[in-house]
Amino acid sequence: MALEKAHSGSKKMTFGENRDLDRVVSAPALSGKVKRVNVKHTRFKAACVRNGTSITEVINQLVDGWLKESE
């Protein structure tokens, strides 16, 4: 997604010039404890992007499914 400066035709932005910052960057919704997972599989990351989901959402779904089977 390319964003342009509001006051010129240049596509380069400097710090603080993005008027759509709230739309582009949003704080993640955290619930429970946060754990770090190193995901090295670029195919997995690309599939998450193609499906419009985050890696966190997919991992949470996988863990929830595993817990249902294991309990």
Image: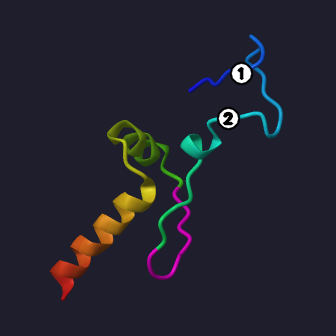
Helix, strand or loop status at disc 2:
loop
> Is 29 situated above or below 8?
below
Are the residues tagged 1 and 2 within 8 Å (C-beta)?
yes
User: What is the three-letter code of the residue carrying label 1?
Assistant: Ala
* Residue at (37, 60) in percent of width and height: 57
* Residue at (16, 79) in percent of width and height: 69
Return the residue found at the far bottom.
Answer: 71
- The numbered mark at residue 58 is none
Q: Count how many numbered circles sit on residues in the image.
A: 2
Q: Position of residue 38 (x, y in %)?
A: 56, 63
Q: For mark 1, what is the residue?
A: 6
Q: Which residues are magenta?
A: 31-39
Please state which of residues 28 and 40 is positioned toward the viewer in this rendering: 28
Q: Position of residue 42 (x, y in %)?
A: 49, 44
Q: Position of residue 32 (x, y in %)?
A: 45, 81
* Residue at (73, 22) in percent of width and height: 5
> Is 69 situated above or below 25?
below
State the CA–CA distance, disc 1 to disc 2: 8 Å
Q: Magenta span has 40? A: no
Please state which of residues 63 and 8 is positioned toward the viewer in this rendering: 8
> Is 40 situated above or below 1?
below
Helix, strand or loop status at disc 1:
loop
Question: Crowdedness of circle 1 by 10 Å Cα count: few (<14), some, many (20+)?
Answer: few
* Residue at (27, 74) in percent of width and height: 64
Please state which of residues 48 and 39 is positioned toward the viewer in this rendering: 48
Return the residue found at the far top.
Answer: 9
Q: For mark 2, what is the residue?
A: 19
**Residue 65 falls in which quadrant of the image?**
bottom left
Q: Quadrant of the N terminus?
A: top right
